Image (cartoon, rainbow, N blue to C red):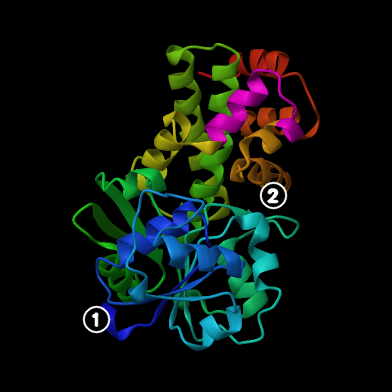
Amino acid sequence: MAERHRIAILGGGSWATAIAKILLNNVSEINWYMRRQEQIDEFIRLSKNPSYLTGVKFDTDHIRFTSNINHLISSSDILIFATPSPFLKQHLRKLRKRIDKKIIVSAIKGIVPDENLIITDFFEQVYNVPKENIAVLAGPCHAEEVALERLSYLTLASTSRDKAKMLAKLFATSFVKTSTSEDVMGMEYSSVMKNIYSIAAGICHGLKYGDNFQSVLISNAIQEINRFCNATNPLHRDISQSAYLGDLLVTAYSKFSRNRLFGNMIGKGYSVKTAQIEMEMIAEGYYATKCIYEINQKYQVDMPIVDTVYEILYNRASPLLKIRELTDKLK
């Protein structure tokens, strides 16, 4: 079934590269959009991404690269978006082709700044893509571990069961197990929010809080995610499943987590700007914190950890004092 679809990846980072590695286990060819032609040229010359997951070799005869997004759209049926959320609108600025008939897969664990829209809502409201044509790729799956072919688990969420099953087969390999879900909004919000809690975990680590406190922090974090998801999209969900709790745990604890690294630097006294410059990577949780905080002004869900991270990142509150205050609010 997968071979009948023309599949495209949009993005040139580590997660896009890991997705390409997964897909090429199951299909003979993929289309791949990268914004910079020089990155494409270097990729073809080296047979690997010159900037990300450089240990992964590709047979570029099976990849049709392009820096023209409209050419990519014309020659593809399934569009897998794997760009950092703050840059999504920038990538789409040159788009002239309609995408409402395409299958859209969001592999973006972020939220569109300014609009405060999760990616599925953004494509539905701005590009008129029907809900049943949109899916979300969720679950604990660091790109670095995919590159090493360490066993990982992914969940494909869509309101269309048939599309979710088709996509799950597309992503299933010897090192990736897949499942399906209909909780699109819940999984997307959870994927966004776990980055905020990962920053919080990093801040606490930078402040020398130990494993005992970290466990309390994360157990409270999953409760905050559950409350928020129930307020925004009330339906029966098992928050302990890997796409929710598992993704939170790996992002909060893993050495590969850029959000945890960002938070760790803040806890050690770096300013937000300095930490961003030092990292040279996007910490999605920085943008997610402001978006979720503002969305919650409508829902008024009790989320003291989100509030604390917001005060530290956006109001320049003292990490030492704010985390100390937070310790009295957790159970």
Q: Earlier in the sequence, mark 1 or mark 2?
A: 1
258 horizontally vs 21: left or right: right
Instruction: Provide residue 321's location: percent of width, then percent of height.
Output: 72, 14
Query: What is the secondary structure assignment of the residue under circle 2?
Result: helix
Query: What is the secondary structure assignment of the residue under circle 1?
Result: loop
Bounds of the magenta span? 259-274
Instruction: Provide residue 11's location: percent of width, then percent of height.
Output: 53, 63
| Residue that badge 2 annotates | 295
Relative to the observer, which residue lies in front, 17 or 36? 36
Residue with the most extreme left position: 174
Tag 2: amino acid: Ile
Tell me where residue 280 sits by quadrant.
top right
Tag 1: amino acid: Met
Residue 239 in view, yes or no: no
| Residue that badge 1 annotates | 1
Q: Residues within 10 Å of mark 2 (few under 14, many from 20)?
A: some
Q: In the figure, 51 relative to 184: above or below?
A: above
Residue 86 in view, yes or no: yes
| Disc number for residue 292 | none
Relative to the observer, which residue lies in front, 263 or 37? 37
Relative to the observer, which residue lies in front, 70 or 159? 70
